Amino acid sequence: MKVAIGSDHAGWLLKRHITLFLKDRERDVIDVGTDSGSSVDYPDYARAVAIEVQAGRVDFGILICGTGLGMAITANKLTGIRAVTVSDPYCAELARSHNNANVVTFGGRIIGPGMAERIVETFLNTPFEGGRHANRIAKIRNIESGGCGQDPSM
């Protein structure tokens, strides 16, 4: 499994922790930055991770800023990206199983290292259920392509 990870200055310490956590579990990690606490603009890193996911060069993306919110807003501007901000493993599980989320975001000022590990592990290991949820994802894709969100076959 290949994962892209990025953060702004508010999330770089937690990003470093999660990167090591993933490498310890033999996950292939692409770190797009940032690498210090110097102020940077989170949209640059959200876009970089989302492009990796969108292009299929990685399976999932992880984004960390102060709250995770700005990262999710930015990543979701790219077609095919379903980024979610989560603060617990249960939401991470449902984001994958029901929403087929491909990018998880959280806040370096909100989530501690232990909880971040649990969120990431749950997110990466939970499969998409498909079924009725696949129909809903199809509606999301339809909206992305300029449709009204109804059943694409209608």
Image (spheres, helix red, strand yellow):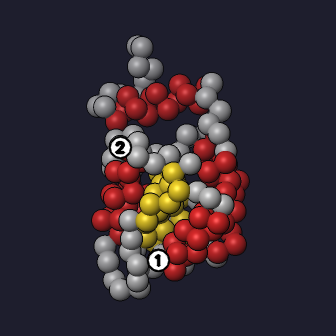
Q: CA distance from mark 1 to mark 2?
A: 24 Å
Q: Residue 55 — which label? A: 2
Q: Is residue 47 left or right of residue 118?
A: left
Q: Callout 2, which amino acid? A: Ala
Q: Position of residue 83 (x, y in %)?
A: 47, 51
Label 2 neighbour load within 10 Å: few <14, some 14-19, many 20+ = few
Quarter of the image with the C terminus is: top left
Q: Callout 1, which amino acid? A: Trp
Quadrant position of residue 32: bottom left
Which is more toward the observer, 65 or 149? Answer: 65
Image position of 140 with respect to 44: above or below: above
Label 1 neighbour load within 10 Å: few <14, some 14-19, many 20+ = many
Q: Is residue 117 left or right of residue 74?
A: right
Find the residue positioned furthest to the bottom: 38
Q: Residue 12 — which label? A: 1
Q: Is residue 84 left or right of residue 146?
A: right
Q: Secondary structure at mark 2?
A: loop
Q: Position of residue 82 (x, y in %)?
A: 46, 46
Q: Residue at x 65, y 39 (%)?
A: 127
Image position of 123 with respect to 111: above or below: above
